[in-house]
Amino acid sequence: MSKSKKTPLKSTLHARNRNREPYDLKALVNVVPELGKHIKPNKYGTESIDFASAEAVKLLNQALLKHYYGIKNWDFPDTNLCPPIPGRADYLHAIADLLSEGTGELQKGNQIKGLDIGTGASLIYPILGVTEYDWSFIATDIDANSIASTEKIIEANNSLKGKIELRLQKNADSIFNGILNPDDIIDFTMCNPPFHASQEEALRGTRRKTKNLTGVKNSKPELNFAGVSNELITEGGEAEFIKIMIKQSKTRGTQCKWFTTLVSKQDNLKRIYKQLRKAEVKQLKTIPMGTGNKSSRVVAWSFQE
């Protein structure tokens, strides 16, 4: 189950991403033995993970966190979104590059504080930010069950204790109010917004993903990355969520240097840029990202010079 030396780097990943090379399946199975039963030849005849299986994806991510990041205990309800670690890590590396502009040095240490909007049950962004850069975080979500899950993850890993503050957002229409206190000063915000506008749209996306992974058309596929409704679906979809975030960020421009968000759909950029111009941001950056055949980007804005 060793990795093939002929397989090229996942060159679209960030240069500091720990998973640019093909997975060392032997090492990953060594730390999470249950992963072994989900390894089988892919359509190219190379041993690989069964990415169409939600259980396999979760076990893979547990192994990646344990082997590469030293997080030994990472679990959450199977109904919640299971994030792909390499892509999530790239977002953190993009923010690190953003914070280092003008200094030439990576900004590390707990004096750097980020706000994770919609941290979910997995707490993945704060975990990666703490382990990679020793940053501190405020992690927020509108779901009390997700916050309870993240509390258990922190309690189970000593390396996370004292570095992540959890805050429940009690008003689903508010992003920053009720979360940021008047005296909070943060370096960045980050968000992976719900990107579907309806249950049917989410199901269509899952059908496409399943067919790409297996070559089989399935009208009722298993969602291999799971996800409860508020993690995947919001009224108006991704563009509307980001529009609201931009409008609300304007009132917090002195408290935060960089506001950022993932944008999964390129077609939404025009609408997002229009809203940013309307908000009169002082700085705007779009950072391309990609894993495999999937392309994405981070949009970052600031009301400070």
Image (cartoon, rainbow, N blue to C red):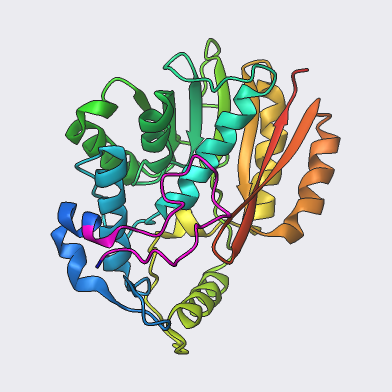
- The secondary structure that most of the magenta stretch takes on is loop
Q: Nearer the viewer, residue 88 or 173?
A: 88
Q: In which quarter of the image is residue 47?
A: bottom left
Residue 240 percent across, percent down from the top left: 68, 51
Residue 247 percent across, percent down from the top left: 72, 35
53 lies left or right of 182: left
Image quadrant occupied by the N terminus: bottom left
Residue 302 percent across, percent down from the top left: 72, 26
The answer to whether residue 17 is magenta is yes
Q: In the displayed structure, would residue 84 be above or below residue 224?
A: above
Tell how many labels.
Answer: 0
- State which region is magenta: 2-26
Q: In which quarter of the image is residue 273?
A: top right
- The structure residue drawn at horizontal position 58% and vertical position 19%, both measured from the top left corner, is 105
Q: In which quarter of the image is residue 74?
A: top left
Asked whether residue 179 appears in the rendered view, the answer is no
Q: In the displayed structure, would residue 203 be above or below residue 239?
A: below
Asked whether residue 96 appears in the rendered view, the answer is yes
Q: In the displayed structure, would residue 291 be above or below residue 114?
A: below
- The structure residue drawn at horizontal position 52% and vertical position 14%, both measured from the top left corner, is 184
Image quadrant occupied by the C terminus: top right
- The structure residue drawn at horizontal position 34% and vertical position 22%, both measured from the top left corner, is 163
Q: Residue furthest front?
A: 5
88 lies left or right of 193: left
197 lies left or right of 146: right
The answer to whether residue 196 is magenta is no
Q: Residue furthest top?
A: 183
Q: Which of 217 and 178 is in front in this view?
A: 217
Q: In the displayed structure, would residue 15 be above or below residue 305?
A: below
Residue 180 percent across, percent down from the top left: 52, 22
- The structure residue drawn at horizontal position 43% and vertical position 17%, both measured from the top left corner, is 109
